[in-house]
Structures are given as structure tokens and as C-alpha cells.
Amino acid sequence: MRALVQRVSQASVSVEGETVGAIGAGLLVLIGFSAEDTDEDTSFIVGKAVNLRIFADDEGRFNRSALDVGAELLLVSQFTLYADTRRGRRPSFSSAAPPEQAEAAFDRAVELFRQSGLRAETGVFQAHMMVHSTNDGPVTIMLDSADRSRPRRGP
């Protein structure tokens, strides 16, 4: 599972000109799933995202998490996070989970994000969405559940 986390001052998503989700200050989280993802991957990413210390404390340092500041969340399914661009000019998405599997995984992720106690809005799965945001900082961080099994330092 991959998530692109952006700290935002506001964000919204619309489908066919109608706003379906909107937040104030918080996190815009674009979420993609691979065919191999498990519930453990989802739990890892959700826990990492809501606990990332990317909000400023009184001294301006990144010492507060979304949970600490009561951030709002806008969660958007984004299969293109699994684009493979190693060959040619057209990305391959063969590593992305098929739609039925991805939709169930996305619903589970939304449920876990909401269980954190933070207000979470979403886009519409498989819809053509227009996402509007004001990236605060800018702060943008890529999370990949595969990283949990990789060593922090190379040999």
C-alpha cells in the first residue's frame, strides 16, 4: 500500500462539478493498493499517516501529529501511485490491485482512519475526480508499506 500524504491548509474533491468531500487544515492522503496488500499493510499506513509529526509546535518544529492537532483528512483512492515507468513512455499499472480488491481495501482504510477519531472525508472510488488543495509548507511525504520490512540503513 502506498500513500502520498500532503499537509494542507484546505482541500476538496469534486465529481462532475459537485463537491463530494472538503476539509480545512489537515492532510490530503492519496492512497493506492497493490494486489499483494494485506490488512497489516493498511494498518501500518494508517498508523504512520495519523502519527507523522509534520505539524509545527510552538517553536516551529515538526513535533505534532495529525492526532495531536485534530487535523481533518481527505482520503482519495489513487491507483496511479503504482505506476511503473521503467520501460517506455506509457506507465504500466499491472502492480495495482484490481478495482474490486482496491475498493474493499480503500473502504477498510477509510474505516481505520475514522477510528483514529479524526474527521475523514473521501472522494468517490473509480470516479474521475478533480482534487483541489493548498499544500501547506509544502509538506509532501510518500509512505510505502513495503518500507516496514526494509532496513533503515544500507550495508
Image (cartoon, rainbow, N blue to C red):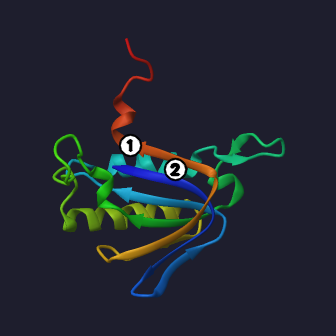
- Where is residue 29? Give x, y as percent: 48, 59
Element marked by disc 2: helix
Q: In which quarter of the image is the C terminus?
A: top left
Question: Which residue is label 1 attached to?
Answer: 144
Amino acid at pointer 1: Asp
Point 79% across, 43% down: residue:
60
Q: Residue furthest top?
A: 155
**Res 151 → quadrant:** top left
| Horizontal side, residue 59 vs residue 18: left or right | right
Point 54% across, 49% down: residue:
140
| Horizontal side, residue 138 vs residue 57: left or right | left
Whether residue 123 is visible to the viewer of this picture, yes or no, is no
CA gap between label 2 and label 1 equals 11 Å
- Where is residue 32? Give x, y as percent: 33, 56
Tell me which numbered mark, 2 or 1, is placed earlier along the sequence.
Answer: 2
Amino acid at pointer 2: Ala
- Where is residue 68? Give x, y as percent: 69, 52
| Horizontal side, residue 114 vs residue 110: left or right | right
What is the count of numbered marks? 2
| Horizontal side, residue 1 vs residue 85: left or right | right
Q: Residue furthest right?
A: 58
Element marked by disc 1: strand
Position of 52 relative to 70 (above/below): above
Question: Which residue is label 2 attached to?
Answer: 49
Q: Residues within 10 Å of mark 1 (few under 14, many from 20)?
A: some
Whether residue 59 is visible to the viewer of this picture, yes or no, is yes
The residue closer to the viewer here, 9 or 147, is 9
